[in-house]
Image (cartoon, helix red, strand yellow):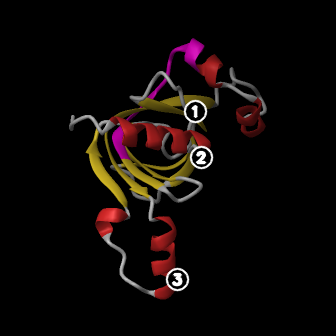
């Protein structure tokens, strides 16, 4: 595992991801595109994220995977790598079940065709963007942007 990402950048990532918990997931060995999945987040567990999916879903079999995050405000981007496994703890399944999840899976949390997946995150690459007013002006006018002032880019454990 890589070094721990700076505490401030780590907090920025998780706060932004919590506000916009959609990640494009793909199994490394799969032939096909990534698909959008709504992540179920736990503020006490920065090592994993969870998803509900139909058993026949292309990522449901699990394995090494990558997830791509672009937050709602487009100020945080991340590439997550890790392993997808079936979550077998019924307490975790119950904890993350919600009305929003039930809207996708109307037969309820005990439906045998619904699987809960846990994405154990091995490492991540995170970019933050904070170009400010001057940077926005430069974007509008075509003037150069100083990359050192445009944001942060780090690799490590989130």
83 to 88, vertically: above or below: below
Q: Which residues are magenta?
A: 80-92
Query: Are discs 3 and 2 less than 8 Å apart at CB?
Result: no
Foreground label between 3 and 2: 3
| Front-most of residues 55 and 141 | 141
Q: Which residue is mark 3?
A: 140
- Between discs 3 and 2, the one toward the N terminus: 2
- Where is residue 129 drawn, in percent x and y? 43, 59
In the shown orientation, is residue 25 left or right of residue 109? left
What residue is rendered at 30% in x and 39% in y? 5
What residue is rendered at 72% in x and 28% in y? 98
Foreground label between 1 and 2: 2
Residue 90: within the magenta? yes
106 to 12, vertically: above or below: above
- Between discs 1 and 3, the one toward the N terminus: 1
Distance from Cα at disc 1 to Cα at disc 3: 37 Å
- Between discs 1 and 2, the one toward the N terminus: 2
Which of the labelled discs sits on residue 20, or is there none?
2
The quarter of the image holding the N terminus is top left
In the shown orientation, is residue 100 left or right of residue 45? right
Q: Which residue is mark 1?
A: 40
What residue is rendered at 39% in x and 52% in y? 30
Q: Quadrant of residue 51?
A: top right
60 to 23, vertically: above or below: above
Distance from Cα at disc 3 to Cα at disc 2: 26 Å
- Where is residue 73 drawn, in percent x and y? 58, 57
- Where is residue 50 drawn, in percent x and y? 52, 31
């Amino acid at each position: 595992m890589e070094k721990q990402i700076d505490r401030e950048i780590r907090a920025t990532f998780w706060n932004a991801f919590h506000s916009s918990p959609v990640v494009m997931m793909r199994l490394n060995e799969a032939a096909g595109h990534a698909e959008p999945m709504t992540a179920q987040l736990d503020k006490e567990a920065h090592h994993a994220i969870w998803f509900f999916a139909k058993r026949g879903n292309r990522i449901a079999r699990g394995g090494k995977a990558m997830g791509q995050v672009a937050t709602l405000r487009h100020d945080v981007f991340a590439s997550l790598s890790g392993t997808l496994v079936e979550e077998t703890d019924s307490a975790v399944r119950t904890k993350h079940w919600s009305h929003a999840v039930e809207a996708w899976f109307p037969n309820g949390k005990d439906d045998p065709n619904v699987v809960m997946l846990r994405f154990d995150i091995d490492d991540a690459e995170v970019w933050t963007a904070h170009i400010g007013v001057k940077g926005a002006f430069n974007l509008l006018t075509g003037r150069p942007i100083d990359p050192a002032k445009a944001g942060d880019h780090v690799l490590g454990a989130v």
